[in-house]
Structures are given as C-alpha cells and as structure tokens.
C-alpha cells in the first residue's frame, strides 16, 4: 500500500511538485494500479511462451544490393551551396 509520504517521495524523485491536498488522490490511484498488477500475478502463465514482440514480424530488412544511382555532379547540380563535392550547410554548434 502506497502512503502519502511515498507519493511525496516519488514526486521528489521525478522532480514534480505534488501538493499535500493531491497526495491522497495520487496514493489512491497508484494503489488501484498496483491492485491490477496483483490481478495479473494471479493469472496462470505456466505454459505460455514469452512474447518478445507483439507483432509476429521477423526480419523486415531488404537485401543490401548495390544499384546504379545518380552521379555526384548530377546531385550537386541542383544547389548553389556546395563545397568540396558535398552540400554546404550551416554549422550547428
């Protein structure tokens, strides 16, 4: 069971201010959540395999195949902002 003091401590750890008047409501809500977890603990999962991903998706990556592409000159022909064979962009520091 979570107390008002524990709610205040969790608020302090999370760096959020919880008013004294709100502590009771938060304690009640958190205790309600813990009760739901208690219900989940009662479910028999003995023969259930672990689920690592909710969708039955395996490797979705494509093959890495080298294909012809545009030349560097063609790519850079659409910009005025180029330098030493690359796009010239503003510094981000």
Image (spheres, helix red, strand yellow):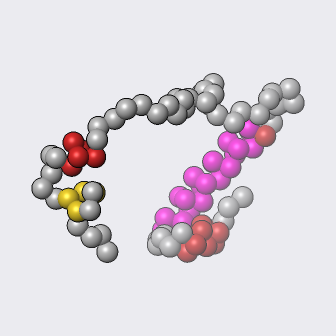
The answer to whether residue 88 of the structure is visible from this angle is no
Left or right of 93? Residue 20 is: right
Q: Position of residue 4 (x, y in %)?
A: 61, 68
Which residue is at a point 78% across and 40% down the rendered structure image? 41
Left or right of 86? Residue 79 is: left
Q: Position of residue 26 (x, y in %)?
A: 55, 59
Q: Position of residue 80 (x, y in %)?
A: 12, 56
Q: Nearer the viewer, residue 32 or 71?
A: 71
Which residue is at a point 64% across and 34% down the rendered structure image? 53
Q: Nearer the viewer, residue 37 or 76?
A: 76
How many badges with numbers are in the image? 0
Q: Position of residue 76 (x, y in %)?
A: 21, 49
Which residue is at a point 16% across and 46% down the rendered structure image? 77
The answer to which quarter of the image holds residue 69 is top left
Task: Give, as a single range, the part of the protein colored magenta.
Answer: 20-40
80 lies above or below 45: below
Left or right of 91? Residue 38 is: right
Residue 88 belongs to magenta span: no
Q: Nearer the viewer, residue 71 or 38?
A: 71
**Predominant SS along the magenta part:** helix
Left or right of 25? Residue 74 is: left
72 lies above or below 10: above
On the rendered image, what quadrant is the N terminus found in? Answer: bottom right
93 lies above or below 39: below
On the rendered image, what quadrant is the C terminus found in? Answer: bottom left
89 lies above or below 65: below
Q: Nearer the viewer, residue 29 or 69?
A: 69
Which residue is farthest left? Answer: 80
The answer to whether residue 46 of the structure is visible from this angle is yes
Which residue is at a point 28% across and 46% down the rendered structure image? 72
């Amino acid at each position: 069971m979570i107390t008002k003091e524990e709610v205040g401590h969790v608020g302090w750890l999370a760096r959020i201010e919880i008013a004294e008047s709100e502590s009771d409501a938060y304690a009640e809500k958190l205790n309600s959540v813990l009760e739901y977890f208690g219900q989940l603990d009662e479910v028999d999962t003995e023969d259930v395999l672990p689920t690592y991903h909710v969708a039955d998706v395996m490797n979705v990556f494509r093959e890495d195949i080298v294909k012809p592409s545009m030349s560097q000159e063609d790519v850079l022909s659409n910009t005025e902002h180029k330098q030493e064979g690359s796009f010239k962009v503003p510094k981000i520091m």
